[in-house]
Image: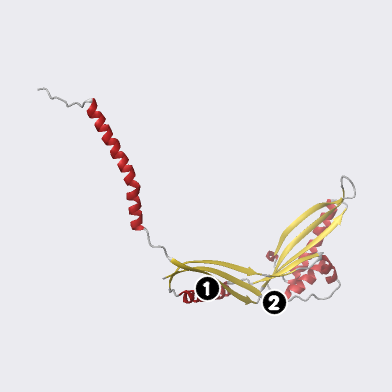
Amino acid sequence: MNTAVPTLSRHGLAWLAGGLAAGLIAASLMGPALGTARAQDYTDEPTHQISVNGNGRVFVTPDIADVQLGVTFQADTAKEASEMAAEAMDAVIKALLELGIAEEDIQTTQLSINPIYDWDDSPPNIEGWEASNIVRVTVRDVGLVGDVVDAATSAGATNVNGISFRVEDPAAAEAEARDAAVANAQAKAQQLAAATGVNIIGVISITENSYNQPVPIYYDRGFAEAAMDGAATPVLPGNVELSIDVYIVYEIE
């Protein structure tokens, strides 16, 4: 038994191809429209917002001081300058340890040996060398800062590069400043809402930035030389400011 397989004429094939092409074009045109319709179905209405900054500041008495001390010497050779600086710094460290400063609270922050040029010559010639050794001393009793400076300079320190005060554990002060910053932001937002006749219904986002501003005191080499004369060095720690900024976005209706 033979089964006949239907065949399409050339005219029939052309009709079928045309129909497929038309269907594909229609689908491509309808696709974006359908996708847009679905996206619109799931898009929330835009929220109305008020954005404000708030600042909170707290002043606290510092309980830590960082003192930058150093020695600087010049000599004809790098070796001589280095040896002079090393000997002087050894004496400074010994004096600090005898004063009660812990060894782990003394940290070297800079050690350098540089040539000294005679710029009157062309090209300039090296006429000597300068060696410098700087340490940072953490003083955990701010009442001893003046004694630290006097002991170091008496032992041979030629530089007192600066003193800064800070709070060892600022957590409690930061919490107080944070509360003040949020309260400041809320007051601004409430004022804006009342002035524009809207209601605050929630918080969308909060961003925080904190600042710890130490109190720096700077001295030059002339001060260090004057301190060697035996006058006691008065040092007043003052207050340290802890500041926190918040940026809050509120939803309104």
Q: Secondary structure at mark 1?
A: helix
Q: What colour scheme has been applied to the protein in the rendered image?
A: secondary structure
Which of these two is toward me, 4 or 87? 4
Q: Is residue 57 above or below residue 160?
A: below
Q: Is residue 153 above or below residue 108?
A: below
Which of these two is toward me, 31 or 69? 31
Q: Position of residue 198 (x, y in %)?
A: 44, 73
Q: Amino acid at mark 2?
A: Gly
Along the polypeptide, which appears first: circle 1 or circle 2? 1
Using the numbered discs, state the Cα–Cα distance from disc 1 to disc 2 in whole angstroms. 29 Å
Residue annotated with mark 1 = 185
Q: Is residue 173 left or right of residue 227?
A: left
Q: Amino acid at mark 1?
A: Ala
Callout 1 environment at 10 Å: few (<14), some (14 to 19), or many (20+)? many
Q: Secondary structure at mark 2?
A: loop
Residue, far top: 2
What residue appears at the point 61 percent right and 72 percent down from the top-left corner? 242
Marks 1 & 2, CB-CB < 8 Å contact: no
Q: Which mark is residue 238?
A: 2
Q: Is residue 86 above or below residue 10?
A: below
Report whether residue 130 is seen.
Answer: yes
